[in-house]
């Protein structure tokens, strides 16, 4: 059991170091720009898409796609940017220099993370995150407005709780409001 716990901690530490490396500078995303010229689709599942001729650096960086997704997801949550959804999972739209990517995960019998180089046409350019904003931790333009509204909502919810209004009724009202919006 201790070996399993130690292995888990090692994996978590490795993942944390990878995430830090991805967001501290543009080295990883520059590698992705170059590598995706010849391999526009890649996944962290080395059993699905492994090439015996790959360099160790390419294998290591390809395995980091899950951490790349997590870095993007963390930034997106802080900036109230929702992922896009498709039939298999969800993804974020990323741009770096002149390159566009879908970075996401697909869930079937197993979950795997992927990176797909693409070109977003004009109508698809909503919710696109510039990777340089992630590195610089730049707030999205709407984030401050949304954060203010969320604070107001939290205050209102606190007032409702203090008034001993049951959570069930609050959830019902929120559900009604969102149903009317659609």
Image (cartoon, rainbow, N blue to C red):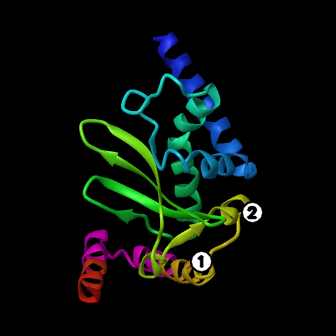
Residue 25 horizontal/vertical position (percent):
76, 51
Indicate whether residue 1 is drawn in magenta: no
> Is residue 80 depicted above or below 94 in this figure?
below
Residue at 51% across, 11% down: 3
Predominant SS of the magenta segment: helix
Query: Do labels 1 and 2 touch, CB within 8 Å?
Result: no
Residue 146 horizontal/vertical position (percent):
54, 80
Left or right? Give the position of 144 relative to 50: right
Q: Sort mark 2 into few (<14), some (14-19) or many (20+) by Cα contacts within 10 Å.
A: few
Secondary structure under the numbered disc 1 in the rendered image: helix
Q: In this view of the protein, which residue sits in the foreground, 81 or 160?
A: 81
Which quadrant of the figure contains the N terminus? top left
> Is residue 52 depicted above or below 143 in this figure?
above
Which quadrant of the figure contains the C terminus? bottom left
Magenta stretch bounds: 154-172
Left or right? Give the position of 87 relative to 27: left
Which residue is tagged 2? 136
Indicate whether residue 156 is drawn in magenta: yes
Residue 66: give its label: none
Residue at 68% across, 66% down: 133
Residue 51 horizontal/vertical position (percent):
47, 27
> Of tags 1 and 2, which is closer to the observer?
2
Rounded to the nearest angstrom, the CA distance separating label 1 from label 2 is: 15 Å
Which residue is tagged 1? 143
Residue at 26% across, 77% down: 175
């Amino acid at each position: 059991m201790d070996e399993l716990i130690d292995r888990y901690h090692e994996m978590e530490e490795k993942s944390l170091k990878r995430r830090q490396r991805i967001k501290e500078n543009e080295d990883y995303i520059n590698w992705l720009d170059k590598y995706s010229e010849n391999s526009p689709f890649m996944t962290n599942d080395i059993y699905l898409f492994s090439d015996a001729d790959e360099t160790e650096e390419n294998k290591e960086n390809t395995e980091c796609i899950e951490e790349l997704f997590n870095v993007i997801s963390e930034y997106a949550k802080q900036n109230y940017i929702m992922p896009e959804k498709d039939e298999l999972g969800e993804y974020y739209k990323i741009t770096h220099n002149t390159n566009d990517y879908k970075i996401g995960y697909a869930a079937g019998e197993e979950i795997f993370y992927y990176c797909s180089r693409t070109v977003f046409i004009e109508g698809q350019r909503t919710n696109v995150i510039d990777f340089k904003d992630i590195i610089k931790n730049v707030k999205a333009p709407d984030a401050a407005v949304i954060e203010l509204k969320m604070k107001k909502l939290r205050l209102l919810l606190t007032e409702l709780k203090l008034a001993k209004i049951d959570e069930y009724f609050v959830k019902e009202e929120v559900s009604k409001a969102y149903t009317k919006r659609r």
